[in-house]
């Protein structure tokens, strides 16, 4: 880990992976392929071909696939094998609820002094993220990774490694669900600078409301319509 409060992509990967370097390498690469839609719902993952591609035995491939199944990216179908999971409206809503529970409760703990003590570093990063949005990079891999690092860094201010790990997993599967949706219409996302400035409050209930408003902005319109969210 580095000294900055902002988690890097390497930090994110280290938090969520097994120590086996081969398993980590395979998992990371498959996550990348999910994110850029190189792997899409319904696609079969051939473990032997993956082993040949990565130059490893089948064992680390199986371990990576098991973790991907536990994280919700794939499912095992009898006589077929590992298949990229189909995506439904209910999946997108469920992932938002999971993220809401983790991120809002974390805000109760870190809002106020923790944000104030690390404000300069967080603020600089928030400005860079909002600039990416202005440049039309909202749905790019660059922004997706930066957004995960920023929000995971906020949750990590709680100094609860398990909470940070589960948050990262929920965001990753949420990204996978959203990029594979048929309906691509998204609502406007709120500013990260506004979010950060709001989290200087010492009022835990206000902090929860601020995070929740930010979290539910920028999400697919179909989620609001199907589940009648105002």
Image: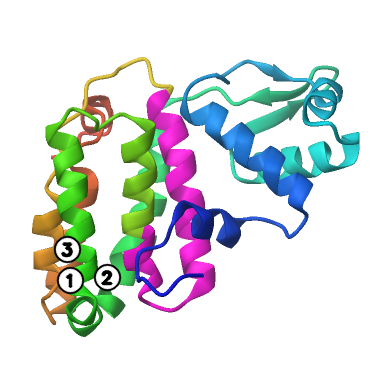
Q: Name which residue lies at 52% across and 55% down.
A: 10
Element under disc 3:
helix
Mark 3 to mark 1 CA distance (whole Å) = 5 Å
Q: Against 110, is 130 above or below?
A: above
* Magenta residues, dominant SS class: helix
Q: Name which residue lies at 69% across and 23% down.
A: 83
Q: Which residues, given as a range, are shown in magenta?
A: 152-179
Question: Label 2 neighbourhood size at 10 Å, few (<14), some (14-19), many (20+)?
Answer: many
Name the one closer to the observer, 53 or 45.
53
Indicate which disc residue 107 carries: 2
Q: Name which residue lies at 31% across and 56% down.
A: 150
Name the one closer to the observer, 104 or 190.
190
Residue that numbered label 3 is attached to: 123
Question: Label 1 neighbourhood size at 10 Å, few (<14), some (14-19), many (20+)?
Answer: few
**Left or right relative to 53: residue 70:** left
**Circles 3 and 1 in contact, beta carbons < 8 Å:** yes
Magenta segment includes 159: yes
Indicate which disc residue 153 carries: none
Give coordinates of residue 13: x percent, y percent: 56, 53
Give coordinates of residue 162: x percent, y percent: 54, 69
Indicate which disc residue 120 carries: 1
Magenta segment includes 85: no
The reply to whether residue 99 is in sight is yes
């Amino acid at each position: 880990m580095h000294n900055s409060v902002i988690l890097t992509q390497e930090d994110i990967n280290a938090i969520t992976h097994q120590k086996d370097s081969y398993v980590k390498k395979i998992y990371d690469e498959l996550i990348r392929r999910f994110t850029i839609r190189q792997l899409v719902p319904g696609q079969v993952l051939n473990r032997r071909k993956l082993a040949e591609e990565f130059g490893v035995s089948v064992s680390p491939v199986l371990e990576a696939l098991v973790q991907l199944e536990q994280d919700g990216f794939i499912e095992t179908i009898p006589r077929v094998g590992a298949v990229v999971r189909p995506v439904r409206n209910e999946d997108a809503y469920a992932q938002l609820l999971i993220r809401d529970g983790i991120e809002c409760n974390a805000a109760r703990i870190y809002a106020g002094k923790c944000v104030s003590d690390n404000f300069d570093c967080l603020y600089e990063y928030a400005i860079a993220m909002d600039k990416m949005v202005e440049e039309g990079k909202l749905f790019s891999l660059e922004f997706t990774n930066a957004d995960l690092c920023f929000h995971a860094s906020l949750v990590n201010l709680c100094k609860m490694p398990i909470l940070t790990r589960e948050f990262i997993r929920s965001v990753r599967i949420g990204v996978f669900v959203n990029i594979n949706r048929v309906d691509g219409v998204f609502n406007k996302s709120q500013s990260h600078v506004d979010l950060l400035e709001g989290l200087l409050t010492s009022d835990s209930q206000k902090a929860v409301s601020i995070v929740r408003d930010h979290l539910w902005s920028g999400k697919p319109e179909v989620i609001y319509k199907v589940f009648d969210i105002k």
